[in-house]
Image: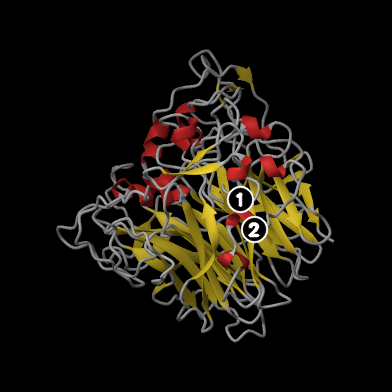
């Protein structure tokens, strides 16, 4: 049967406002927040936006108190086995009903200075202050040791918000990092006011901001971030939400756009659309251009779900990433949900657009390849586990792997060949998981998540596939090749029957393609929901297990939020995957202690949410130094 059309639940008539600084909301405008998104928009919204503004944040407050009993030892170690700890805080103990608040770090990014391989910066969503913010750690000795830095990412100066001189944001995240050719580092951060659904403050403004580190390799940052785009909603009655930004910089001294900084993101509008926009800076991140549409109209986009198409038929998009080639060409890849399907087919598509004038204009979208989204969580893990979201379903009887997950594209341009563009992305239907292997598409859930025959019995698994262009993004191997025949990033002995997800991909300066990803091919991880991190390279190694032991499914945020992505950086000889790790036990105040006559003690215990794991765990950021030849 045809894919079911889903009509937006937002009243028509809200205008789509473009511009660097937006005026105050119009009188009589209707409130618009996460709860007002259509089911499809909610399914595509980033984990940060969902956790910050959505219902899961309030469910977290109502989690049942865990019966903690086992005495806990401090978790201030600087690593785990052969892995190196990136965030340097000691675990904060928290109340069981706020498990994750004051503790978690997730959604990791890392980048290395292209002109100094000893300098690395990592970014992550950081909850140690109780609400999400853009955390920063840096290394000046090639990743062996790390220190934490602070950017004032709750403070914004300007007059964009009701003609007041300052705005104080409550939450932030979705970090991205880039370096230019002169050793300046740039850090992008999405900032939110939560709005009245979460706090007494009705302000629901949000914006995207860029910090710059000049001369300190990430140890310090400019005090007031520069706005890329700002959404004024101080009255709690706006008309759209900005989401999921990523950043790139042109670090080639010979490029015609040397040191230009690019940011791309998704705009969720009240009319039900989700378009990709881009802005650029030609003055080292001091100011940014007005937003430009990237996800332009295309015949590739046929199914529009009854949602208006004010800027073209490609109206449901997410997960854009900008990358710059050695010739200065800018590429933006993203996931698009407007592919036409018949019967039970449930494919979506990855698209790319190219700019050869420094981000001023973009080409029409080109198809990178088809992909199939991860399965709907509630359908296979049980009602109420993570409504409306996809997740990486374990194959056994357990249902602990319920964190929100999605397949996204990561792109890289060969520094030795500017015409070679490689895109990696996850797909639940692939050469190891398809009808001949016992996995068949079965249409869509209402939120556009995939339904499949063979999910829990082991017939299906997610793989990271590769689509390559050798003509500067004009065509790709995945343009005409079925995703069932595309190559995958690893041919590990058990990879063909297990899940791989959340990949980061880069080229090394020597042209080695490096990909790191979460992996369930070790031990019995595919039936327990545990996972490891694996790194593959097309020179020097085939694939290597990076983690020394498997990580349990996350328990923080009721087990529903673990970020959206990981990343890897590479020098000529080494790779640095950075990931959120759950092997550390979470701590709580022991029951019956911390009252008159009974000194407080710390204990560990089972998670306070719906899972059946023996011990609640923490999310912390780890890395490894992996030789790549």
Q: Earlier in the sequence, mark 2 or mark 1?
A: 1
The kind of secondary structure element at disc 2 is loop
Q: Which residue is mark 1?
A: 430
Q: Is residue 256 above or below residue 555?
A: below
Looking at the rendered image, the quarter that the C terminus falls into is bottom right
Which one is nearer the viewer's eye here, 164 or 429?
429
Image coordinates for residue 272, horizontal then vertical, percent: 30, 56
Image coordinates for residue 275, horizontal then vertical, percent: 39, 64
The kind of secondary structure element at disc 1 is loop
Q: Is the residue marked by circle 2 packed among few (<14), some (14-19), or many (20+) residues within 10 Å?
A: some
Q: Which residue is mark 2?
A: 486
Image coordinates for residue 299, horizontal then vertical, percent: 41, 70
Residue 142 makes an appearance in the image: no
Residue drawn at point x = 63 percent, y = 37 percent: 582
> Distance between the Cα atoms at labels 2 and 1?
7 Å
Outermost residue, left direction?
28
Residue 443 makes an appearance in the image: yes
Q: Is residue 103 left or right of residue 62?
A: right
Residue drawn at point x = 59 percent, y = 31 percent: 457
Q: Is residue 523 above or below residue 329?
A: above
Q: Is residue 468 above or below residue 290?
A: above
Circles 2, 1 touching at the beta carbon (< 8 Å): yes
Q: Quadrant of residue 277?
A: bottom left
Q: Is the residue marked by circle 1 packed among few (<14), some (14-19), or many (20+) residues within 10 Å?
A: many
Q: Quadrant of residue 408?
A: bottom right
Which one is nearer the viewer's eye here, 9 or 237?
9
Q: Is residue 29 left or right of residue 36?
A: left
Image coordinates for residue 79, horizontal then vertical, percent: 73, 41
């Amino acid at each position: 049967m045809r894919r079911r059309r889903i009509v937006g639940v937002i009243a028509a008539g809200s205008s789509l406002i473009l511009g660097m600084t937006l005026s105050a909301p119009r009188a009589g405008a209707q409130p618009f927040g996460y709860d007002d998104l259509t089911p499809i928009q909610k399914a595509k919204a980033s984990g940060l936006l969902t956790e910050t503004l959505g219902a899961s944040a309030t469910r977290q407050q109502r989690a049942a108190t865990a019966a903690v009993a086992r005495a806990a030892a401090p978790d201030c170690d600087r690593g785990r086995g052969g892995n190196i700890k990136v965030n340097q805080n000691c675990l904060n103990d928290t109340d069981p009903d706020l498990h994750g608040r004051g503790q978690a770090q997730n959604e990791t990014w890392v980048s290395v200075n292209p002109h100094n391989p000893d300098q690395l910066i990592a970014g992550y969503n950081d909850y140690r202050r109780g609400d999400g913010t853009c955390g920063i750690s840096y290394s000046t000795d090639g990743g062996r040791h790390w220190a934490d830095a602070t950017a004032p990412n709750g403070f914004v100066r300007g007059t964009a918000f009701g003609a007041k001189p300052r705005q104080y944001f409550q939450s932030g995240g979705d970090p991205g990092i880039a370096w230019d050719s002169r050793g300046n580092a740039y850090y992008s951060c999405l900032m939110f006011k939560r709005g009245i659904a979460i706090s007494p403050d009705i302000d629901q403004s949000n914006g995207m901001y860029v910090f710059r580190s000049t001369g300190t390799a990430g140890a310090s940052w400019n005090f007031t971030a520069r706005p890329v785009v700002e959404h004024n909603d101080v009255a709690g009655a706006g008309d759209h939400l900005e989401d999921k930004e990523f950043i790139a910089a042109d670090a080639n001294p010979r490029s015609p756009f040397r040191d230009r900084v690019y940011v791309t993101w998704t705009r969720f509008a009240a009319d039900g659309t989700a378009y990709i926009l881009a802005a650029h800076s030609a003055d080292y991140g001091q100011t940014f251009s007005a937003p430009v549409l990237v996800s332009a109209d295309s015949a590739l986009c046929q199914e529009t779900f009854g949602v208006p198409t004010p800027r073209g038929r490609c109206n449901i998009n997410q997960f854009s990433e900008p990358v710059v080639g050695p010739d200065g060409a800018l590429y933006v890849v993203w996931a698009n949900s407007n592919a036409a399907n018949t019967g039970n087919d449930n494919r979506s598509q990855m698209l790319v657009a190219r700019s050869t004038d420094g981000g001023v204009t973009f080409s029409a979208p080109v198809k990178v390849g088809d992909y199939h989204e991860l399965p709907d969580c509630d359908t296979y893990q049980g009602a109420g586990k993570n409504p409306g979201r996809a997740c990486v379903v374990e194959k056994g009887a357990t249902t602990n792997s319920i964190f929100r997950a999605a397949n996204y594209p990561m792109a890289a341009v060969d520094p030795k060949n500017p015409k070679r563009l490689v895109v990696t992305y996850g797909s639940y239907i692939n050469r190891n998981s398809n009808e001949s292997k016992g996995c068949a598409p079965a249409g869509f859930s209402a939120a556009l998540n995939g339904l499949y025959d063979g999910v829990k019995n082991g017939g299906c698994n997610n793989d990271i596939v590769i689509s390559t262009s050798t003509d500067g993004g004009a065509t790709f191997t995945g343009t005409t090749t079925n995703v069932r025949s595309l190559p995958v990033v690893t041919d590990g002995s058990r990879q063909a029957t297990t899940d791989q997800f959340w990949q980061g991909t880069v080229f090394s300066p020597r042209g080695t393609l490096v990909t790191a990803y979460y992996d369930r091919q070790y031990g019995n991880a595919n039936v327990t929901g545990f996972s490891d991190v694996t790194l593959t390279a097309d020179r020097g190694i085939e694939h290597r297990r990076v983690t020394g032991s498997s990580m349990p499914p996350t328990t923080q945020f009721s087990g529903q939020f673990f970020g959206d992505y990981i990343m890897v950086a590479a020098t000529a000889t080494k790779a640095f995957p950075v990931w959120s790790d759950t092997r550390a036990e979470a701590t709580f105040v022991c029951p019956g202690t911390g009252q008159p006559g009974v000194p407080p003690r710390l204990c560990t215990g089972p998670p306070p949410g719906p899972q059946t794991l023996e011990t609640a765990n923490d999310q912390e950021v780890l890395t490894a130094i992996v030789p790549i030849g």
